[in-house]
Amino acid sequence: FSFRNKGEFSEDSVNCIARDLFQFLQPKWLEVRGEFWPRGGIAIKPSVRLTGEGSTNQT
């Protein structure tokens, strides 16, 4: 599956990937970082960290 042609923000893609992996793998914690090509000259590198307690840290 590819997110290349999916019409959503980079942050949403990273969150979706993290949720899917977390549900499938059931780890104690998981961190996903995205590195995307700059759009309009602005580079964006969103990340999300999920823990088993259900808390979310997003940057």
Image: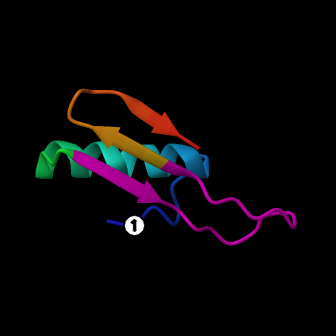
Colour pattern of the rendering: rainbow
Q: In the displayed structure, would residue 57 be above or below residue 8?
A: above
Write down the residue under mark 1.
2
**Residue 24 in picture, x, y percent from top left:** 13, 49
Q: Which residues are magenta?
A: 29-47
Disc 1 element: loop
**Residue 58 in picture, x, y percent from top left:** 52, 39
Q: In the displayed structure, would residue 32 be above or below residue 8?
A: below
Instruction: Quarter of the image for the N terminus: give it.
Output: bottom left
Residue farthest along the bottom direction in this orientation = 37
* Residue displayed at 39% across by 66% down: 2
Q: Provide the major secondary structure of the magenta segment.
A: loop
**Residue 45 in picture, x, y percent from top left:** 63, 60
Lateral position of residue 20 relative to residue 3, left or right? left
* Residue displayed at 61% across by 47% down: 9
Q: Nearer the viewer, residue 22 or 3?
A: 22
Q: Amino acid at mark 1?
A: Ser
Lateral position of residue 27 relative to residue 55, left or right? left
Q: In the displayed structure, would residue 52 be above or below residue 41?
A: above
